[in-house]
Protein backbone atom coordinates (compact mmCIF):
# COMPACT_ATOMS: atom_id res chain seq x y z
CA UNK A 1 0.00 0.00 0.00
CA UNK A 2 2.82 2.32 0.92
CA UNK A 3 4.53 1.52 -2.39
CA UNK A 4 1.32 2.32 -4.24
CA UNK A 5 0.88 5.70 -2.56
CA UNK A 6 4.54 6.58 -3.25
CA UNK A 7 4.01 5.65 -6.91
CA UNK A 8 0.83 7.74 -7.02
CA UNK A 9 2.67 10.66 -5.47
CA UNK A 10 5.46 10.39 -8.06
CA UNK A 11 3.01 10.23 -10.99
CA UNK A 12 0.98 13.20 -9.68
CA UNK A 13 4.21 15.11 -9.13
CA UNK A 14 5.39 14.32 -12.69
CA UNK A 15 2.03 15.43 -14.17
CA UNK A 16 1.89 18.69 -12.24
CA UNK A 17 5.59 19.33 -12.99
CA UNK A 18 5.01 18.96 -16.75
CA UNK A 19 1.86 21.10 -16.59
CA UNK A 20 3.85 23.74 -14.74
CA UNK A 21 6.75 23.44 -17.20
CA UNK A 22 4.47 23.82 -20.22
CA UNK A 23 2.26 26.46 -18.57
CA UNK A 24 3.18 29.21 -21.06
CA UNK A 25 2.70 26.90 -24.05
CA UNK A 26 -0.66 25.63 -22.75
CA UNK A 27 -1.80 29.15 -21.93
CA UNK A 28 -0.84 30.44 -25.40
CA UNK A 29 -2.52 27.64 -27.35
CA UNK A 30 -5.74 27.90 -25.35
CA UNK A 31 -5.91 31.66 -25.90
CA UNK A 32 -5.42 30.99 -29.64
CA UNK A 33 -8.46 28.74 -29.70
CA UNK A 34 -10.77 31.37 -28.24
CA UNK A 35 -9.44 34.38 -30.21
CA UNK A 36 -8.71 33.10 -33.69
CA UNK A 37 -10.44 34.27 -36.85
CA UNK A 38 -9.15 32.74 -40.08
CA UNK A 39 -9.32 34.55 -43.39
CA UNK A 40 -8.68 32.92 -46.78
CA UNK A 41 -6.95 35.31 -49.21
CA UNK A 42 -6.46 34.47 -52.93
CA UNK A 43 -2.80 35.05 -53.87
CA UNK A 44 -2.44 34.05 -57.53
CA UNK A 45 -3.58 31.21 -59.84
CA UNK A 46 -4.26 28.22 -57.53
CA UNK A 47 -2.35 29.65 -54.57
CA UNK A 48 -4.07 30.99 -51.42
CA UNK A 49 -3.06 32.23 -47.99
CA UNK A 50 -4.83 31.59 -44.70
CA UNK A 51 -4.19 34.50 -42.38
CA UNK A 52 -4.94 34.16 -38.68
CA UNK A 53 -6.25 37.32 -37.13
CA UNK A 54 -6.03 38.02 -33.44
CA UNK A 55 -3.60 35.47 -32.08
CA UNK A 56 -0.23 35.54 -33.84
CA UNK A 57 -0.37 32.39 -35.96
CA UNK A 58 1.98 32.05 -38.92
CA UNK A 59 0.52 32.50 -42.41
CA UNK A 60 -0.49 29.25 -44.09
CA UNK A 61 0.01 28.84 -47.86
CA UNK A 62 -2.25 26.59 -49.97
CA UNK A 63 -1.80 25.28 -53.49
CA UNK A 64 -4.58 23.30 -55.14
CA UNK A 65 -3.38 20.63 -57.56
CA UNK A 66 -5.43 18.19 -59.65
CA UNK A 67 -5.39 15.54 -56.95
CA UNK A 68 -4.87 17.34 -53.66
CA UNK A 69 -3.86 20.40 -51.70
CA UNK A 70 -0.30 21.27 -50.73
CA UNK A 71 -0.25 23.17 -47.44
CA UNK A 72 2.67 25.30 -46.29
CA UNK A 73 2.73 25.40 -42.46
CA UNK A 74 -0.14 24.26 -40.30
CA UNK A 75 -0.18 26.57 -37.28
CA UNK A 76 -1.44 25.31 -33.92
CA UNK A 77 -2.73 21.77 -33.35
CA UNK A 78 -5.60 23.15 -31.25
CA UNK A 79 -7.22 24.91 -34.25
CA UNK A 80 -6.88 21.96 -36.65
CA UNK A 81 -10.66 21.91 -37.28
CA UNK A 82 -10.72 25.63 -38.12
CA UNK A 83 -7.75 25.23 -40.47
CA UNK A 84 -9.27 22.20 -42.19
CA UNK A 85 -12.51 24.18 -42.64
CA UNK A 86 -10.53 27.06 -44.22
CA UNK A 87 -8.76 24.58 -46.55
CA UNK A 88 -12.22 23.30 -47.57
CA UNK A 89 -13.16 26.84 -48.67
CA UNK A 90 -10.43 26.47 -51.31
CA UNK A 91 -10.81 22.82 -52.23
CA UNK A 92 -12.64 19.62 -51.30
CA UNK A 93 -9.57 17.58 -52.25
CA UNK A 94 -7.44 15.88 -49.58
CA UNK A 95 -4.27 17.47 -48.21
CA UNK A 96 -1.52 15.82 -50.24
CA UNK A 97 1.62 17.22 -48.63
CA UNK A 98 2.46 19.62 -45.83
CA UNK A 99 5.64 21.70 -45.97
CA UNK A 100 7.03 23.18 -42.72
CA UNK A 101 8.88 26.50 -43.10
CA UNK A 102 10.55 25.87 -39.68
CA UNK A 103 9.96 24.14 -36.35
CA UNK A 104 8.27 26.96 -34.36
CA UNK A 105 4.98 25.97 -32.77
CA UNK A 106 3.02 28.88 -34.29
CA UNK A 107 3.86 27.38 -37.74
CA UNK A 108 4.30 23.63 -37.24
CA UNK A 109 2.45 22.62 -34.07
CA UNK A 110 -0.25 21.27 -36.42
CA UNK A 111 2.18 18.43 -37.28
CA UNK A 112 0.79 16.84 -34.10
CA UNK A 113 -2.65 16.60 -35.78
CA UNK A 114 -1.85 16.21 -39.49
CA UNK A 115 1.17 13.93 -39.00
CA UNK A 116 -1.01 11.55 -36.99
CA UNK A 117 -3.35 11.44 -40.05
CA UNK A 118 -0.42 10.10 -42.13
CA UNK A 119 -0.16 13.19 -44.32
CA UNK A 120 3.46 13.39 -45.55
CA UNK A 121 5.31 16.36 -44.02
CA UNK A 122 8.32 17.90 -45.78
CA UNK A 123 10.87 19.93 -43.80
CA UNK A 124 14.55 20.71 -43.38
CA UNK A 125 16.16 17.87 -41.38
CA UNK A 126 16.82 20.21 -38.44
CA UNK A 127 13.05 20.72 -38.06
CA UNK A 128 12.62 16.99 -37.48
CA UNK A 129 15.57 16.95 -35.07
CA UNK A 130 14.16 19.87 -33.06
CA UNK A 131 10.59 18.54 -32.92
CA UNK A 132 11.82 15.14 -31.71
CA UNK A 133 12.81 16.84 -28.48
CA UNK A 134 11.33 19.37 -26.11
CA UNK A 135 12.34 22.87 -27.21
CA UNK A 136 12.86 26.08 -25.31
CA UNK A 137 12.30 29.41 -27.00
CA UNK A 138 15.02 32.02 -26.82
CA UNK A 139 14.18 34.26 -23.88
CA UNK A 140 16.98 36.81 -24.17
CA UNK A 141 15.30 39.10 -26.65
CA UNK A 142 11.78 38.95 -25.24
CA UNK A 143 11.03 38.45 -21.54
CA UNK A 144 7.64 37.02 -22.59
CA UNK A 145 9.49 33.97 -23.92
CA UNK A 146 11.49 33.25 -20.77
CA UNK A 147 11.03 29.64 -19.63
CA UNK A 148 8.79 28.94 -22.61
CA UNK A 149 9.03 25.17 -23.09
CA UNK A 150 7.29 23.37 -25.95
CA UNK A 151 6.66 19.62 -25.57
CA UNK A 152 8.30 17.17 -27.97
CA UNK A 153 6.39 15.60 -30.87
CA UNK A 154 5.66 11.87 -31.01
CA UNK A 155 7.24 9.81 -33.82
CA UNK A 156 4.06 9.90 -35.98
CA UNK A 157 3.87 13.74 -35.61
CA UNK A 158 7.26 14.46 -37.18
CA UNK A 159 8.28 15.46 -40.73
CA UNK A 160 8.53 12.34 -42.88
CA UNK A 161 10.49 13.77 -45.84
CA UNK A 162 13.55 15.85 -44.99
CA UNK A 163 16.05 17.74 -47.13
CA UNK A 164 19.42 19.41 -46.75
CA UNK A 165 19.71 22.21 -49.32
CA UNK A 166 16.93 21.97 -51.87
CA UNK A 167 13.97 19.81 -52.82
CA UNK A 168 11.57 20.24 -55.74
CA UNK A 169 7.96 19.15 -56.20
CA UNK A 170 6.55 18.93 -59.71
CA UNK A 171 2.77 19.27 -59.56
CA UNK A 172 0.53 19.96 -62.56
CA UNK A 173 2.51 22.54 -64.53
CA UNK A 174 4.09 24.08 -61.45
CA UNK A 175 7.61 23.56 -60.08
CA UNK A 176 7.80 24.18 -56.34
CA UNK A 177 11.34 24.74 -55.05
CA UNK A 178 11.92 24.29 -51.32
CA UNK A 179 15.16 26.09 -50.50
CA UNK A 180 17.48 26.28 -47.48
CA UNK A 181 19.80 29.31 -47.28
CA UNK A 182 21.60 28.59 -43.98
CA UNK A 183 21.10 29.60 -40.34
CA UNK A 184 18.87 32.67 -40.02
CA UNK A 185 15.55 32.79 -38.15
CA UNK A 186 16.36 29.23 -36.85
CA UNK A 187 18.67 26.49 -38.15
CA UNK A 188 16.06 24.90 -40.41
CA UNK A 189 14.22 27.56 -42.41
CA UNK A 190 12.68 26.72 -45.77
CA UNK A 191 11.80 29.27 -48.45
CA UNK A 192 9.20 27.97 -50.91
CA UNK A 193 9.10 29.29 -54.46
CA UNK A 194 6.31 28.60 -56.96
CA UNK A 195 8.25 29.16 -60.17
CA UNK A 196 5.43 29.44 -62.70
CA UNK A 197 3.14 31.60 -60.57
CA UNK A 198 6.07 33.65 -59.22
CA UNK A 199 4.94 33.41 -55.60
CA UNK A 200 7.28 32.91 -52.62
CA UNK A 201 6.39 31.82 -49.06
CA UNK A 202 9.21 32.94 -46.76
CA UNK A 203 8.07 31.61 -43.37
CA UNK A 204 9.58 33.74 -40.60
CA UNK A 205 12.71 34.46 -42.64
CA UNK A 206 10.73 37.59 -43.56
CA UNK A 207 8.01 39.13 -41.37
CA UNK A 208 6.09 42.41 -41.21
CA UNK A 209 5.72 42.99 -37.46
CA UNK A 210 8.80 45.19 -36.89
CA UNK A 211 12.07 43.95 -35.40
CA UNK A 212 11.99 40.21 -36.12
CA UNK A 213 12.29 37.48 -33.53
CA UNK A 214 15.47 35.52 -34.22
CA UNK A 215 15.84 32.22 -32.35
CA UNK A 216 19.52 32.44 -31.45
CA UNK A 217 19.39 29.63 -28.88
CA UNK A 218 18.04 27.24 -31.55
CA UNK A 219 20.57 27.88 -34.29
CA UNK A 220 19.30 31.29 -35.44
CA UNK A 221 21.70 34.08 -36.41
CA UNK A 222 21.08 37.80 -36.86
CA UNK A 223 23.90 38.04 -39.40
CA UNK A 224 22.49 34.97 -41.19
CA UNK A 225 18.96 36.44 -41.10
CA UNK A 226 20.21 39.56 -42.96
CA UNK A 227 22.07 37.41 -45.53
CA UNK A 228 18.96 35.28 -46.02
CA UNK A 229 16.86 38.38 -46.81
CA UNK A 230 19.35 39.00 -49.62
CA UNK A 231 18.99 35.37 -50.72
CA UNK A 232 15.18 35.70 -50.72
CA UNK A 233 15.47 38.72 -52.99
CA UNK A 234 17.81 36.78 -55.30
CA UNK A 235 14.93 34.39 -56.13
CA UNK A 236 12.36 37.23 -56.54
CA UNK A 237 11.73 39.91 -59.13
CA UNK A 238 9.57 43.06 -59.08
CA UNK A 239 6.43 41.02 -59.81
CA UNK A 240 6.91 38.29 -57.19
CA UNK A 241 4.12 38.06 -54.62
CA UNK A 242 5.59 37.27 -51.21
CA UNK A 243 3.71 35.50 -48.41
CA UNK A 244 5.57 36.51 -45.24
CA UNK A 245 5.64 34.45 -42.02
CA UNK A 246 3.39 37.06 -40.38
CA UNK A 247 1.54 40.01 -41.95
CA UNK A 248 -0.19 40.68 -45.28
CA UNK A 249 0.99 39.89 -48.81
CA UNK A 250 4.25 41.65 -49.63
CA UNK A 251 6.96 42.20 -52.23
CA UNK A 252 10.68 42.37 -52.93
CA UNK A 253 11.02 46.04 -52.00
CA UNK A 254 9.61 45.44 -48.49
CA UNK A 255 12.11 42.59 -48.04
CA UNK A 256 14.83 45.02 -49.04
CA UNK A 257 13.59 47.64 -46.54
CA UNK A 258 13.82 45.13 -43.70
CA UNK A 259 17.28 44.04 -44.88
CA UNK A 260 18.58 47.63 -44.95
CA UNK A 261 17.02 48.42 -41.55
CA UNK A 262 18.53 45.37 -39.87
CA UNK A 263 21.87 46.00 -41.55
CA UNK A 264 21.90 49.49 -40.07
CA UNK A 265 21.13 48.03 -36.62
CA UNK A 266 23.95 45.51 -37.06
CA UNK A 267 26.63 47.87 -38.38
CA UNK A 268 25.86 50.72 -35.97
CA UNK A 269 25.82 48.32 -33.02
CA UNK A 270 29.25 46.92 -33.86
CA UNK A 271 30.71 50.35 -34.66
CA UNK A 272 29.14 51.95 -31.58
CA UNK A 273 30.47 49.21 -29.34
CA UNK A 274 33.98 49.65 -30.77
CA UNK A 275 33.71 53.37 -30.02
CA UNK A 276 32.65 52.72 -26.44
CA UNK A 277 28.98 53.76 -26.77
CA UNK A 278 26.36 52.41 -24.37
CA UNK A 279 23.34 50.52 -25.73
CA UNK A 280 21.10 53.59 -25.28
CA UNK A 281 23.66 55.75 -27.12
CA UNK A 282 23.75 53.18 -29.95
CA UNK A 283 19.92 53.37 -30.21
CA UNK A 284 20.21 57.14 -30.74
CA UNK A 285 22.50 56.60 -33.76
CA UNK A 286 19.97 54.36 -35.54
CA UNK A 287 17.75 56.25 -37.98
CA UNK A 288 15.71 53.40 -39.40
CA UNK A 289 12.21 52.86 -38.04
CA UNK A 290 11.02 49.28 -38.32
CA UNK A 291 7.79 50.11 -36.50
CA UNK A 292 6.64 48.79 -33.16
CA UNK A 293 7.15 45.13 -32.46
CA UNK A 294 3.82 44.53 -30.84
CA UNK A 295 3.19 41.82 -28.30
CA UNK A 296 6.82 41.54 -27.30
CA UNK A 297 7.08 44.51 -24.98
CA UNK A 298 7.88 48.19 -24.98
CA UNK A 299 9.60 49.33 -28.27
CA UNK A 300 12.78 50.73 -26.68
CA UNK A 301 13.20 47.54 -24.67
CA UNK A 302 12.85 45.45 -27.84
CA UNK A 303 15.52 47.61 -29.57
CA UNK A 304 17.78 47.37 -26.53
CA UNK A 305 17.48 43.59 -26.46
CA UNK A 306 18.01 43.31 -30.23
CA UNK A 307 21.28 45.25 -29.88
CA UNK A 308 22.30 43.02 -26.95
CA UNK A 309 21.59 39.99 -29.14
CA UNK A 310 23.81 41.33 -31.93
CA UNK A 311 26.61 41.79 -29.40
CA UNK A 312 25.96 38.36 -27.89
CA UNK A 313 26.23 36.76 -31.33
CA UNK A 314 29.68 38.35 -31.53
CA UNK A 315 30.60 36.96 -28.09
CA UNK A 316 30.31 40.36 -26.42
CA UNK A 317 28.44 40.08 -23.13
CA UNK A 318 26.84 43.28 -21.83
CA UNK A 319 24.72 43.97 -18.77
ZN1 LIG B 1 9.31 31.46 -36.17
Image (cartoon, rainbow, N blue to C red):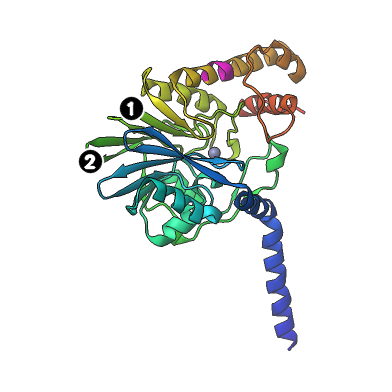
Mark 1 closeness class: few <14, some 14–19, many ≥20 residues within 10 Å: some
The residue positioned farthest toward the left in the image shown: 173
Q: What's the mark number on residue 172?
A: 2
229 displayed left or right of 178: right
* Above/below status of 108 relative to 209: below
Q: What's the mark number on residue 198?
A: 1
Find numbered disc 2 in the image and state the secondary structure of the residue it sits on.
loop
The tag earlier along the polypeptide, 1 or 2, is: 2
> What quarter of the picture does the N terminus occupy?
bottom right
**Front residue of this view, candidates 153 and 176:** 176
**Front residue of this view, candidates 242 and 309:** 242
* Above/below status of 258 relative to 197: above
Measure the C-alpha gap from mark 1 to mark 2.
15 Å
Dominant secondary-structure state across the stretch colored magenta: helix
> What quarter of the picture does the C terminus occupy?
top right
Segment colored magenta: 259-263
- Taking the image as four quarters, which one is ligand 1 found in? top right
**Front residue of this view, candidates 69 and 42:** 42
* Residue 126, x across and y down, in percent: 45, 44
Residue 308 painted magenta? no
Q: Residue at x 71, y 65 (%)?
A: 16
* Residue 218, x across and y down, in percent: 56, 41
* Residue 207, x across and y down, in percent: 53, 30
* Above/below status of 99 relative to 156: above
Q: What's the mark number on residue 70?
A: none
Find numbered disc 1 in the image and state the secondary structure of the residue it sits on.
loop
**Front residue of this view, candidates 198 and 233:** 198
Q: Residue at x 74, y 82 (%)?
A: 5
* Residue 167, x across and y down, in percent: 31, 39
Amino acid sequence: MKKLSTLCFLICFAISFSQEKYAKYNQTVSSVESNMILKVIPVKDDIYMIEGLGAGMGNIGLFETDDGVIMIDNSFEIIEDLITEAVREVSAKPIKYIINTHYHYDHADGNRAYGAQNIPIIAHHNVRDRQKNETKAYGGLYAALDNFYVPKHEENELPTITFEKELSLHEDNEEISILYFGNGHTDGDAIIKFKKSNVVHTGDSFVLYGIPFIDISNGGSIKGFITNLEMINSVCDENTIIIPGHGGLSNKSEVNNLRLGLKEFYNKTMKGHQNGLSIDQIIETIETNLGNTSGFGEPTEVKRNFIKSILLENNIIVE
